[in-house]
Amino acid sequence: MRFTKEREALFRCVENTKQFATGKKQQKSILDLEKERLQLLCNILNTYNQHLSHFGQNLIAIHSAISQVDAEKDIQTLLEEMSVFSPETKSEFLLMDYYVRQFSLISFLMRSLF
């Protein structure tokens, strides 16, 4: 009987050691997973930081381009270009306007008849 109790005690001791070793392995694997997760988060933050720095550079470039724009001068140039028509251009616009009006009138009459 004493022999059996010693065996059971030894068996429990071995089982506890196995569980302790398994627990250490699990703890080590959990730590490894945590390290991988932290490394991944670090990489994501670095990528985000790079995107923000490029975004800032783009904003600076856009700001400098906008500050060089002279809206009044551009509007004046556009008005000058739009107001100067050659006689040929004027006749083309008048002819096109005539055909549009005729087509509209014909379409209206066709719809009203049917």
Image (tube, grey):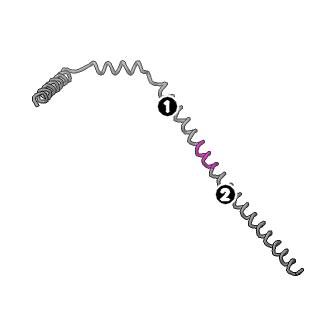
Q: Which quadrant holds the C terminus?
A: top left
Residue type of the residue flagged with mark 1: Ile
Q: Residue at x 37, y 20 (%)?
A: 75
39 inside magenta stretch = no
Residue 78 x %, y %: 34, 21
- Mark number displayed over residue 49: none
Classify the position of the N terminus by image quarter: bottom right
Identify the residue at the far front of this view: 1
What residue sits 80% from the left and 69% below the top? Answer: 16
| Label 2 crowd bin: few (<14), some (14–19), many (20+), radius 10 Å | few
| Residue sitting at the far left | 113
**In the displayed structure, does residue 9 sit left or right of residue 100?**
right
Residue at 26 percent of width and 19 percent of height:
84
Residue indicated by mark 2: 33
Q: Nearer the viewer, mark 1 or mark 2?
A: 2
Q: Is residue 110 left or right of residue 12?
A: left
Q: In terms of depth relative to the viewer, which is nearer, 112 or 9?
A: 9
Residue 28 position (above or below residue 93): below
Q: Which residues are magenta?
A: 41-49
- Secondary structure category for the residue under label 2: helix
Residue flagged by tag 2: what amino acid is it?
A: Leu
Please report whichever mark, 1 or 2, sits nearer to the chain's N-terminal start: 2
Question: Quick check: 2 left or right of 29?
Answer: right
